[in-house]
Image (cartoon, helix red, strand yellow):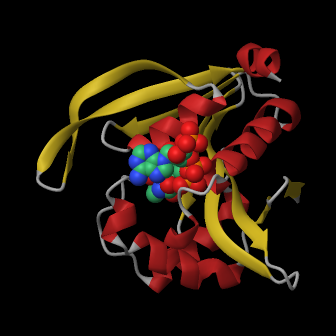
């Protein structure tokens, strides 16, 4: 369990399937992701079951505790496509419970994930892809210290229009310097 001021990152549990199905079948959320097909319970249960076999993926649930100490899952984040030789990983994040978006939880979760990626997994470079219209995500990533390093023009077709995909990254040395 990784602990921040307001949130924790914990292992993915089977019971999270309900939340994942709700979030990943919601077009307001999936417009920012590569998903576009309907997601079935069977597909999602298989994904959770398969996590244990995936040597290049480390996923966490994002959890907050309320005033009665009850835990609530509000999102999901992880390191993907980990390249152990070159020490590169790609991050992904969702604050799926929409009433918790825009309140700093995503930025805090990403900070915890970077600390884990750089100090525990010993990555040298953490990268991500984000669509140009996702200003909330880009603001959060800029604040953390990710820098834009390029874009793929009109690479994504979303909501009836083509959009650029922006590539961002942060290096371990940059992350250490900021902290
Ligand atoms: C992207 C995401 C993880 C960010 O987490 P979050 O908790 O919502 O974001 P935060 O509150 O930590 O930070 C957002 C920043 O953007 C700003 N912001 C908030 N709402 C915004 C909006 N609608 N448009 C633009 N900026 C916005 C905030 O002010 C904040 O910047 P600031 O602290 O400098 O003021 C979350 O919004 C999310 O899951 N979105 C849907 C899925 C997604 O886009 N995943 C990422 C794919 S690359």
Residue 172 is at least partly visible in this image: yes
Q: Quadrant of the N terminus?
A: bottom right
Vertical order, 64 against 118 (above or below): below
The x and y percentages for residue 139 are 50, 37
Vertical order, 137 against 76 (above or below): above
Residue found at x 53% / y 71%: 99
Q: Quadrant of residue 133?
A: top left
Residue found at x 70% / y 63%: 62
Residue found at x 41% / y 39%: 130
Side of 9 relative to 142 (left or right): right
The x and y percentages for residue 87 are 71, 25
Vertical order, 124 against 118 (above or below): above
The x and y percentages for residue 159 are 17, 56
The x and y percentages for residue 33 are 39, 53
Q: Nearer the viewer, residue 51 or 107?
A: 107
Residue 93 is at least partly visible in this image: no
Side of 22 relative to 109 (left or right): left
């Amino acid at each position: 369990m990784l602990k921040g001021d307001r949130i924790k990152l914990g292992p993915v549990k089977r019971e999270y399937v309900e939340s994942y199905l709700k979030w990943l079948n919601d077009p307001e959320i999936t417009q920012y992701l590569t998903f576009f097909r309907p997601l079935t319970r069977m597909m999602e249960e298989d994904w959770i079951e398969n996590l244990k076999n995936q040597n290049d993926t480390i996923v966490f649930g994002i959890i907050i505790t309320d005033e009665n100490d009850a835990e609530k899952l509000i999102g999901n984040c992880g390191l993907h496509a980990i390249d152990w030789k070159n020490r590169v990983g790609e991050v992904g994040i969702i604050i799926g419970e929409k009433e918790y978006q825009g309140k700093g939880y995503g930025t805090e979760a990403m900070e915890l994930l970077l600390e884990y990626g750089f100090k525990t997994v010993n990555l040298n470079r953490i990268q991500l892809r984000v669509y140009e219209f996702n200003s909330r995500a880009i603001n959060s990533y800029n604040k953390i210290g990710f820098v834009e390093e390029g874009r793929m023009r009109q690479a994504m077709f979303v909501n009836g229009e083509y959009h650029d995909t922006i590539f961002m990254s942060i290096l371990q040395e940059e992350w250490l310097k900021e902290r």
